[in-house]
Every structure is written in structure tokens, then in C-alpha cells.
Image: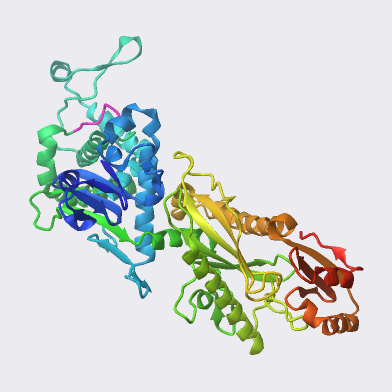
Amino acid sequence: MKILIEGEKYNLDSLTKVFDDPKFFIQEEMFGTINCVGYYHSFIKNELIYILPKVFIKGRKAFKLSPQQLFDLDLKASIKHDADYVWVRQLLIYFYNSLAEFRNRHRNTLIVETSQSFELNSNLGLKEYSYLDLILSFVNFYKKNKNTILYHHIEFISNQAKKAKWDKTIRTSLPILISNNSPLYIDIRNKQKKVNDEEELLSYFFSILNHFKTEHDLPVSIDKSYKLITGSQFEKLQRTGLAKLRKIKHRYFADTLKRIYQLCELYFDKTDLSSPKRKNEEFISVRNYNIVFEDMIDKLFTDKTYDKSINKISIEKLKNNNDGKIIDHIFDYKSIIDTDNIFYIGDSKYYKSDSLAGKLSTYKQFTYAKNVIQFNIDLLNKKKPYDDIRYRDDITEGYNISPNFFIYGHLTDKSNFDNPILKKFQIVKKSSHFEDRIFDRDTLFVLQYRINFLFVLKSYTSINTDKIDAFRIGTKNYFREEFLKYFNSPSDCEFKFYEKDFREENLSEFVNENFRLLNGKVIKIRENTLLIAIHKEDKKKDLLHNLIKDFIPKIFI
């Protein structure tokens, strides 16, 4: 078992030893750079390869080792003898499951942008088991049905004891000593000459399971009473197993035994060395893994039944902008400044753990937000707005604050798969045409968050919907609270907010008389309440303070 990291360079000799095909790396003289993320298994070289995403790289190292050192590490020995590496098996299973989940969710190759094609490659059929699928299926099935299988085995042994030939049994087999040094004979000789089909099937199943355990150091305990086929006899069984299985087909009635038969059949079909249909290798690989990360985050944040639509205009329409740009994440939630809802617009950032978004990413995010604002204004002009969502106030011509966020995959504790560790970091990114006009359509803010990549990885394939729903609700509230903290702190946002309740006619009159002074600095937040924001560098702040003497300071909650 080997671990490689996307985008990293390795000695060419190292790569050719594990890959039968160079399609997973780009050769540069005596080195090769990994150009994808994925899973690979060579039947010829009997090697499992995991190509992990670059998010595991921090400070040019992954898990405190250089990429080449990680590749050279004897993972099988490390997992078995070093407690620091026990988490590796769990990580690799979640990682593989995430690839399989993405493959099931996106069966067609997609063009995401004209400049960026997304490519998902696999030589496995949609319903075909991979070698790793078989390992996981055998282990999980055994753990869930251990007692039932043992019952069938004990039943067989008990039947063997009937009409036993004890002289031959004692002469040809060794007993197990139990309490009080009493002998217990497992291999009992009797007068029955007919082979028990159930016991033959169990022997195949446990021989395969034992082979997986030996090859991959699996944490599985197999009872010594089961007859195991090992060594050269097992290699022979790999060649002849299918034929032997089919001789005893249709002789099982218990559901557990039927499933054991299916698993054994799948294994022998894949490992039969003489089969002309046998593959030399199998793989699932993804280029542009940022698309996978985006899908993982979107599944985590977005309810699969969520399709808010008015007059056939859905959230999916909002995600796909008219200019060809696609928004990663969008959901409606409580507005920052009033009781209406607003769209929260997010972008997944797939970088190495210590990297940040640059100017281009920030510019693109502001473009996404402006497109959503314009789309909602167009709906308003057509008198078809979304229910409970308000982007623009007609009286003041002020625009609601549009919350934006970046979310980065991050690795902090390599063994923590259950805590999202979602935290805001870095300064808030801001864009504006007029610095002192917060309620202008061109004034936008982006908050940045890090989330535990291992939590995202596990949640992507989790069937615990209650836990994910709780995370989703809590996260939306957390995003809003962080925006509230920002705008409640004049030293951070550089604005102070004030409000006043008016009579309806007085409110319109106040706005109309002072429109030039208040343009972009005022918005109506309730039926008859005005909210005014004064920037610390506003050249007209003295006039504004004089105008709002009877306003009171506003604290957002």
C-alpha cells in the first residue's frame, strides 16, 4: 500500500514500480508529477495506491513527512506497529468512499468552464466492485454476521459428532484444550462421506478473508475452528474457485449463506488469473479535484430536497449565471440587518492547507454576488420576486447587505473525522465603488472560513442525515453571527449604525429631502424604520450626525 499526493514530484523509478501506466503522472526528466487524485490497484504488482488531494500538504510536508518519504514508508508495518499511523486505514477508506460517491453522483463528464474541463476516469463499471470494495464488503459483512456464520459452523460440527469414529478422530487430529485441560476435538471423523456444502462455502469465505487480513493487515479476528486454505493451495483456489463454487450453487437457503456465495463469486471472478476478462489494473481518478471538493461542501451545506422556486425560477437557475459563471454554494437565510431573508453566496477554495485565495478569486466572488443581486432586481422589476427575500428598498433605493463567504479545506488533527472545526480567519475582504456607501449595490463583503477536511470527507458518504442537518442549521447561524460581530464592531467594519422609527409619511419626506446626502447610506429595514450607516472617513459625517440627532445606535442581533 502506497500514498501519493496530487501535484507532488517523485522519483520516476518509484512511480514506474507501482503504476503499469504513466497516465497518472507527467514525466519531467527523472521525475514524475502526479496529475490527479484517485485510487489505483495493480493486480500484476499486487499494490494498492491512494493519490490524496493536495490539501494534505502543509509547509511542503504531508503528515510531517516529505511526499517522497511518505511514499517510501512501509505503511503496512507502520499501521501494525506504530500507533501514530492507525488513523491511516480510516482515512483511506473514507477517501475511497468519497471517490465512489462522487462517481455515482456525476456519471457524465462535465465542462465546468470553457477554460477548465473536468475529467473523471475509471475502468470500473457503475455496478462493478473494485478490489477495495471487495475487501470492505468482506470485512463489514463478517463483522455484522459473525454470530450467524458461527451458528452455521457449530451446527455443522455438532452434526459431525453424530456417529463419530473416535479412534480415527483421536489418531488423526489434535484437540484444543479448554477449561480443566479437557480436550475439544474440532475435526471429527465420522461415517458420513458426503461433503457438507455449507462448510465448504464457509471455508472459501474465511480463506479469502484471511488472505485479505494477511495482505493488508486488517483488524479482523478469525476463529481458529474454521478450516482455512492458505499458501500455494489458496493460489490454486484463485484459479479454480469459480468452477468449484458453481458446482455447489443453488444449495443454500439462508440469506446469510446466499450473500457469502455472492461475495466469494465476486472475488474469484476478479482474481481468476486464467480469465480472459480479467483486468490488469483498476482505478478511479479525478483531474481538477476542486470540483469534487465543491460537491462535497455543497452536499454538506445544501439540503438535497431544497429547490426554492418562484414562477419556475429555481436555486439552480441562480447558481448558473447568464455570463457562464457557476456559483459553488448559495442558500437563503436570515438577513444581517432586518427580518427578511437574503442569499448567502459561497465559494469553495481547494488549496494546500496553508494557502489563501488571491485577488482573482476575490474578484470572481464579487462578480457572482453582483449577478445574483441583478437577477433579483430583474425579478423585482417583473413583479416576480422571491418570497421573503429583499435586495432593494424602493423608498431609499438602498441595497441590502449581501453576505459572501470563502470556505477552505484544512487539516489540523489527522485523526479527527467527527468535528467540523469551522472557524473564521483572516481579515474580511471588501469591495466598493464608494467607500462610505454600505447600502450601495457595489459594496460587498467576504468572510473566510476553514473547515476540517476530514470531517467533510466522512460526511460526504455518511448516512446519518440528522447529524448533517444539525451541522447545516448550525453553520448557517454561525455564518450570520460572524457577520453580525463584524458589523457590530466599528473598528472592524469602519461603520457606525443608527436607526429611527417614523410615521409612514414622515419617513418618505425625510428620505426625499435628504436623498443626495443619504444616497447609499440609508435603507428601510422595517415597515417604518430607517437604518443609517456612517463611515469613519465620510467627508460629510458632521452633516450626517447633525441630521440624525434623534436616531439611536443600532446593535444587530
Q: Is residue 464 left or right of residue 178?
A: right
* Rendered location of residue 197, percent (x, y): 20, 42
Quadrant containing the N terminus is top left
* Rendered location of residue 306, percent (x, y): 55, 69
Q: Main secondary structure of the magenta part?
A: loop
**Which quadrant would residue 190 be assigned to in this image?**
top left
* Rendered location of residue 127, percent (x, y): 29, 61
Taking the magenta stretch, the answer to whether it contains residue 65 is no
For this orientation, the residue located farthest to the bottom is: 382
Taking the magenta stretch, the answer to whether it contains residue 225 is yes
Residue 252 visible to an observer of this rendering: no
Judge whether 213 appears above or below 293 on screen.
Answer: above
**Image point (22%, 49%), residue name:** 41
Q: Is residue 496 left or right of residue 334?
A: right
The residue nearer to you, when weighing 330 against 166, is 330
The residue nearer to you, when weighing 540 against 300, is 540
**Image point (82%, 73%), residue name:** 530
**Image point (38%, 60%), residue name:** 102
Judge whether 542 appears above or below 371 on screen.
Answer: above
Q: Is residue 301 left or right of residue 159?
A: right
**Image point (11%, 35%), residue name:** 233
Please tell me how many numbered marks the rendered image carries.
Answer: 0
Which scheme is used to colour this image of the protein? rainbow
Judge whether 384 appears above or below 273 on screen.
Answer: below
Residue 380 visible to an observer of this rendering: yes
For this orientation, the residue located farthest to the front is: 539
Q: Magenta segment, which residues?
A: 221-228
**Which quadrant would residue 22 be assigned to in this image?**
bottom left
* Rendered location of residue 28, percent (x, y): 20, 54
